[in-house]
Image (spheres, helix red, strand yellow):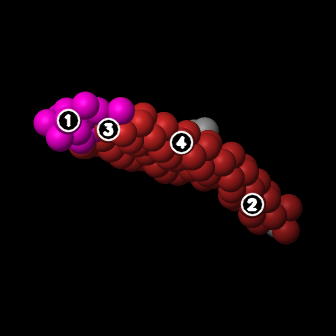
């Protein structure tokens, strides 16, 4: 009887261990994605600052700033969507691992 009780416990522990390992790997992927996004945002900001520094008049500076803000807004929405999708997928994967479908 002890063998039949320990098997489900061992299976549950292994499922939790596998889920934890997968979550750690996915957390690292998420961190790298966020780091890449931050790098891209910084590069775009410096690109806009360089362009503004080389502008010939105030109207050009204003256009550069407006373009940067519009593009950054779109980039931020896209990046937030990407991170949200990753987190949702990680959650689905973790639950699948814990219930034995992963």
- What label does residue 52 carry, if any? 3
Q: Earlier in the sequence, mark 3 or mark 2?
A: 2
Q: Could you tell me what secondary structure mostly forms the magenta stretch?
A: helix
Image quadrant where residue 8 sits: bottom right
- What label does residue 13 carry, if any? 2
Q: Earlier in the sequence, mark 2 or mark 1?
A: 2
Of tags 3 and 2, the one toward the viewer is 3
In the depicted structure, whether residue 87 falls above or below residue 1? above
Of tags 2 and 1, the one toward the viewer is 1
| Residue receiving disc 1 | 57
- What label does residue 25 carry, if any? none
Contact, mark 4 vs mark 2 (Cβ under 8 Å): no
Of tags 4 and 3, the one toward the viewer is 3
Residue 58 among those drawn in magenta: yes
Q: Which residue: 57% across, 46% down?
A: 35
| Residue receiving disc 4 | 39
Residue 21 appears left or right of 66: right
Q: Which residue: 14% across, 36% down?
A: 59
Q: Nearer the viewer, residue 42 or 84?
A: 42
Asked whether the viewer can see residue 4, the reply is: no
10 Å crowding of disc 4: few (<14), some (14-19), many (20+): few
| Tag 2 secondary structure | helix
In the depicted structure, whether residue 93 falls above or below residue 51? below
Q: Looking at the picture, how far across and down is residue 3, in whole percent? A: 85, 61
């Amino acid at each position: 009887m002890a063998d039949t009780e320990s098997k489900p416990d061992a299976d549950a522990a292994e499922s939790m261990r596998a889920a934890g390992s997968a979550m750690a790997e996915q957390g690292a992927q998420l961190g790298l994605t966020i780091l890449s996004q931050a790098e891209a945002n910084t590069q775009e900001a410096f690109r806009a600052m360089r362009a503004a520094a080389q502008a010939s008049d105030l109207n050009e500076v204003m256009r550069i700033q407006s373009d940067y803000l519009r593009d950054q807004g779109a980039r931020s929405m896209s990046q937030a969507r990407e991170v949200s999708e990753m987190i949702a997928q990680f959650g689905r994967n973790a639950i699948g691992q814990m219930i034995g479908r992963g």
